[in-house]
Image (cartoon, helix red, strand yellow):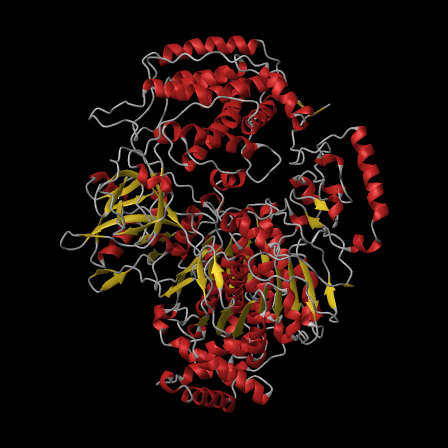
Amino acid sequence: MTRTRPKRPHRAQTLISKQQVTGPSSNRLNRSTPRTATQLTFAFSFLFLFLLLRSPLHFMLPVKRDSMGGAEVADASLTAFKKHRASPSAAAAATTPPAAASDAEVSMAGGSNGIGNASNGVGNGNTPTLVSGTNGGDGNSQDIDEDLHSRQLAVYGRETMRRLVASNILISGMQGLGAEIAKNLILAGVKSVTLHDVGNVELWDLSGNFIFSEDDVGNNRALASVQKLQELNNAVTVSAITTDLTKEQLSGFQAVVVTDISLQQAIEFDDYCRQHQPPIAFIKGEVRGLFGNVFCDFGPEFTVLDVDGEDPHTGIIASVSNDNPGLVACVEDERLEFQDGDLVVFSEVQGMTELNDGVPRKVKNARPYSFTIEEDTTNYSRYIKGGIVTQVKEPKVLNFKSLNESLRDPGDYLLSDFSKFDRPPLLHLAFQALDKFITECGRFPVTGVEEDALRLISLVAEINNGLNDARLQEIDQKLLRNFAFGARAVLNPMAAMFGGIIGQEVVKACSGKFHPIFQFFYFDSVESLPTEPIDPEDMKPLNSRYDAQISVFGAKLQKKMEDAKAFVVGAGALGCEFLKNLALMGVCCGDLGKLTITDDDVIEKSNLSRQFLFRDWNIGQAKSTVAASAATLINPKLHIEALQNRASPETENVFHDGFWESLSLVINALDNVNARLYIDQRCLYFQKPLLESGTLGTKCNTQMVIPHLSENYGASRDPPEKQAPMCTVHSFPHNIDHCLTWARSEFEGLLEKTPAEVNSYLSSPSEYISAMKNAGDAQARDNMERVLECLDSDKCESFQDCITWARLKFEDYFANRVKQLTYTFPEDSTTSNGALFWSAPKRFPHPVKFSVDDSSHLNFVMAASILRAETFGIPIPDWVFFSSQKLAESIDKVIVPDFQPKKDAKIVTDEKATSLSTASVDDAVVIDGLVMKLESCRQKLPSAYKMNPIQFEKDDDTNYHMDLIAGLANMRARNYGIPEVDKLKAKFIAGRIIPAIATSTAMATGLVCLELYKVLDGGHKLEDYRNTFANLALPFVSIAEPVPPKVIKHQDMSWTVWDRWIIKNNPSLRELLQWLQDRRLNAYSISYGSCLLYNSMFPRHKERMDKKMVDLAREVAKAELPPYRRHFDVVVACEDEEDNDIDIPQISIYFR
């Protein structure tokens, strides 16, 4: 039996393919895959048996996302039968969610994650727990959905993910902060999240919590949260506890997070968690207005397995001296990242083999390309060549203090804003005083009530006076007054920021990955307050969903936010978070407000682990449309328009001048530098504030681009990434990145570019031949040779032909090419200056001998032959997927000719070379010969013959693309003695996957939205704004003022990059020159684009003096000015009165 589209069966090579078991969600199958009668009979028989064994309750539960993107019944009995991934069209058709789950009272149980805590039963005995989701059956299952979590796996790795999926988390307090923490952890894929809250939803909560709607007011917060949070990831069990929490209920969790309990109860819980064996991680977080804090206690002895999450640093050794201490010099290929005190191990050293003993040695005197080791190498053997030095990353043990002890002796705080160096000690007292205020008064301080503020200040003073030597000398009463007035409010930006931080701390606690906060972190953003004093009357509640925000910022700023016109560029992870934040803040929710969001991408499964507005049933749909719809569910008053246009020069008819001029601000949510630079230029041109941010794994940054106050985004750029020379990638690789770069290049050349080239020739033979003859170069010759190979010598007509092609490719790549290379450059070869040719960083290769007994060899041939067959439209026999023996027999039929090296082979060794094609004087003659052969082949083909080019798709684990690329890279690595990688790691590198997690995204967007308050208020100075760089892994937070723009001065005038001189009323050339002369500037050149409109040296240009500038642009520069364009821009070169060049701003000529 055959099928026309090859798809991977179950990884265990079971005799039941994925198509054979459809489950109840058959509408999500890839319907393009035909199924035989036998397959269907088996599937229905299995399904019938399955239905008999299931209880009615199970069919009321939501379905779980399986690893291939389809739907799977929540039962362990189906875990051995995984289906095909749903096609985009099928997923897009499923526009409605699965049936909602019914409420059920159950208790949770699980296993230990091996890092944090041993017992995993909730152990709450009589406490009713509501569950609205299922974790897919087997509670002990450690399967990781790599399609879903691919970007997260790039940050954490498999071992950390395994610990996460075995972790049970308790979150107490389901106001805005608790909701954000829960969201981030559920997206991360922990085993279970239990929500605790005894309070009911109030209208007040709606400005800080994305889960609640007005319909939830009056319902228990935890119960109201379960179902909506469950939708984020049905592989995570989400449940609720609605009664008072007791210490004994904590025993079943790896981490306990509290956000809204008294200090006394927090101390009791923390003490219980510390005494539990093994200890339970305890995290206390609070958000009070524009102030927040985090406290972490992971137990008396907590082991951090990986303090920073970075790959171990390495270096390629160039020499080692016989000295005391020994000096190690490395090749100047890349700067060394070692620091004094690091431990390193040596390997592959030739000569001084004493270093290859695997014993870690300490680095001293670290330099960019050298270091010394604490070892006497005087009597060691003489170093000959080679060697790799690799950093050894050691675990770190942290001794946490209890909350009770830390309140008295907090130790060192995690600092963020060094302009507020003295702020954390004061906030440490302020939060304790607030707890005392609430305990004594039974309520929060009331906004605008001075008596409450004074009482809190007196409590701070009272606590401070009891500190003796640690007593603060000064107390900032103004700061404490702001703290008191906003204490009841949970602001969404603060909740988002701290939700990201605390979510990451939970991951650290459960996995031992990254360094925890040790132990207090305090933060405030009082600069976000309006610059003008707020009338207490303006802060009173209006019985609206924004009352909490109004209590901090006042109703006037709230009105400005509601009437704002914002442009969000991008609807991915950042975009989803921004939409949620803006909806909760009320931005663009007024009668005059409007939010425009654009994104030209569609939803993929891998998006779902971070882009929380999307669900399984949205796969294949437009991101912007789905995100906009989800945002209006958060706040129905949000006025939003979703577009699918890429913001670029080509869409300036959509995002025209009028659109840009109407905006209040722009928020970037992009994933590439070029798009950011374009939006930056547009904001610069139209003088609009740009709120910029980005993430990379655990790192995030924010940048505020404020007209006339700060430099623009493009003013400073990171240096371009260093690219490996072409000759290194193709002939002299020395790391796995080189191998994967080569593998990706070969994949695209063999399976995409060459078939496309064939189709280009077959669709228009005469035009193609004419183009190749006109080019007449080595590249044209190579293209035609590849086309000829596909249609003649390498043409495949059966699957056996494809196997033959794949086997011979193996021999060519991993045996013959290496034999030729080592024939041309033997191991003892020397360069023109007498140095060894095969010296570091070059690695001498060895050919690989093919063996059907090596599974990696078989897998390479299997993947290559399947993809080759796809390009030729050849059906794939079923036995290929299930019978390795039959595959081996087919391979054994291939006759592999003996290799004979060429004496005149030309191998590129020049690191500056940009092409491997070698030009020849005979290229034109060769091309003429190729034309004749191609025409002869074409005559033998059917009239409609064409090939099927394959575009690389990294995120489909069933298409064999990554199998082939990983196979290519690892066989090449084997040639050169480079450590091989698994397919997941290969996917990260070859697929250029950007590591991404929800926590850093949430933190970045929260920080940006704190700046948004300042932008819309409009009165803030440069020193009030903040740019941030953070690395949650370390943890490290650096907050600083933006950099001002460069100022250019002339006479009594000054300008910056933000200035654009505008001349209206359709001026003539003479009027423009006079306008400049009035400013003591003599224009000698005016250009539009690349066309010169005026130059003072050309006499004939004086005839243009009385012509309108717009007419000159149209007539001379052939400018096409569409109806929506009201102006055009010219670049003017000027001199001052002393003939010095003056760099003036761009000039805009308004002609309408």
Q: Is residue 921 left or right of residue 457?
A: left
Q: Is residue 804 left or right of residue 53?
A: left
Image location of residue 208, percent across then percent down: 58, 70
Which residue occupies the foreground of this view, 611 or 64? 64
Which residue occupies the foreground of this view, 767 or 165? 165
In the image as oriented, which residue stretches furthest toward the right?
52
Q: Quadrant of residue 29?
A: top right
In the image as oriented, which residue stretches furthest toward the front?
379
Q: Is residue 474 above or below residue 41?
A: below
Q: Is residue 775 visible?
A: no
**Location of the N terminus (image quadrant):** top right
Image location of residue 1042, percent across then percent down: 35, 63
Which residue occupies the foreground of this view, 532 or 146? 146
Q: Is residue 836 above or below residue 412?
A: above
Q: Is residue 660 visible?
A: yes
Q: Is residue 829 above or below residue 610?
A: above
Q: Quadrant of residue 733?
A: top left
Image location of residue 419, percent across then percent down: 34, 71
Image location of residue 42, percent across then percent down: 81, 34
